[in-house]
Image (cartoon, rainbow, N blue to C red):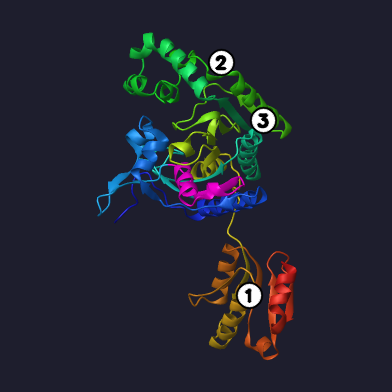
Amino acid sequence: MITKPKGTIDVVKEDALLWNYVNYVVDDMMKSYNYEFIRTPIFEASELYHRTVGNTSDIVKKETYDFKDKGNRDLTLRPEGTAGVVRSYLENKEYASPDTKKYYYNGTMYRYERPQAGRLREFTQFGVEVLGSNDPAIDAEVISLQYHILEALHISNLQVNINSLGDGESRLNYKDALIKYLEPHIKDLCEDCQERFKTNPLRILDCKVDADSDILKNAPKTIDYLTKEAKERFDTVLKYLDILDIDYEVNPKIVRGLDYYDHTVFEIVSLDNEETRQSVLGGGGRYNKLIKELGGPDSYGIGFACGIDRIIALMKDIDLYKDIQREIDCYVMYVSEEEKLHALDIVQNLRLNGVVTETDSLNKGLKGQFKEADRLNAKFLLILNNEDLKRGLVNVKDNHTKEEEAVDISEIVEYIIGNL
């Protein structure tokens, strides 16, 4: 028997119901915030990710799915969403618009890493990218949007962990201080960190192996090396978050795992219980140099990404929607061939009017159809019989109140819609 590849999942049953619910909430909230949906290719030129995510990042060095196509072109399955959106923004000359561009996406990403809870090789993220504005209020809006999407999913005890990497001068000042601090200790860190020390020391702060070591816990903090301008900008972002009533904590350890970030970086965690404590549901940051580095104008960007797989796992862990069930509006029941002809017509009319409707397709008797209707949690049962049909009537039963009523067959659609 052929099985699914390691690090992938089938989204079925309860997971599928939760999946659709999450997507519904995301789409609805994005509409309220006036974000425009964008879809980019699942694979892009490998150079795109090498230039944006960074050759020194673990994602590019260890985790990307790279391949050559039949034209000998180097391609990569997308490991994250920002690079493709920015590439599309530039290729389609969206920067020529005088307006700030606000996009959201929802799609699969691919990283070859060790599969574990909440971390797959094929995973799905929704996220946003706001391009063209450097207003600190946009930073607060993006964080607020992510926060309120998770809140709308009834995930409580949310906290934003936020930090600033500062501008170019701030980063240089911090990099010098970090190198001086780490140099005497570097051999006490993992091999990857020793390599990062030569190529990109900031990546050491994102190390999963040495995350709890005293060396990293006592490392210099980025916010202590911010320029005056960068510090004022960060303070303004925090002021706006206060106005928006977003619960946050300044956490100097937040650096994120991608090379293109500057200024604001953040993660949102759930503190719902001990088992899911500090469960990172998503995060993002500002990237004011990325657009120019990809050949565009000197412009600005900020975004976030959330893992749907991780959100669903949390919702199940803390028993959110544990009673979620598949539900339909109507189940149409029949026995004879003549009744079936009427059933097919009624079912189609209901469906085309937006009523979720099902009927038997396995030639079950009425007893079996009643059981199926109960499994589907049908609100109404339409029980057809020849005697009623001759009089132009259909017996309608409310499956919740158990009340029954004979309804004119020509008024079925209006009756059901009016009572849903």
On the image, numbered disc 2 is attached to which residue?
A: 224
Tell me which amino acid carries mark 3. Asp
Q: Are marks 2 and 1 in contact (CB under 8 Å)?
A: no
| Picture layout, residue 371 above or below residue 200 | below
The numbered disc on residue 350 is 1
| Picture layout, residue 40 above or below residue 53 | below
Q: CA distance from mark 2 to mark 3?
A: 22 Å
Quarter in which the N terminus is drawn: bottom left
Which secondary structure, mark 2?
helix
Question: What's the residue at 72%, 33% (across, down)?
Answer: 245
Residue 303 is situated, as x and y percent measured from the top left of the image, at: 55, 39
Query: Which residues are the magenta region?
Result: 80-106
Residue 213 is situated, as x and y percent measured from the top left of the image, at: 44, 16
Q: CA distance from mark 1 to mark 3?
A: 46 Å
Tell me which amino acid carries mark 2. Asp
Magenta-drawn stretch contains 59: no
Q: Nearer the viewer, residue 204 or 331?
A: 204
Q: Residue furthest top?
A: 184
Which secondary structure, mark 1?
helix
Q: Return the disc, 2 or 3, that comes first in the chain's sequence.
A: 2
Residue 292 is situated, as x and y percent measured from the top left of the image, at: 47, 37
Question: What's the residue at 33%, 33% (across, down)?
Answer: 61
Residue 186 is situated, as x and y percent measured from the top left of the image, at: 36, 14
Q: Along the horizontal axis of the image, is 217 left or right of 31?
A: left
| Picture layout, residue 166 above or below residue 30 | above
Q: Nearer the viewer, residue 168 or 338?
A: 168
| Picture layout, residue 221 above or below residue 56 | above
On the image, numbered disc 3 is attached to which residue?
A: 247
Quarter where residue 263 is shown? top right
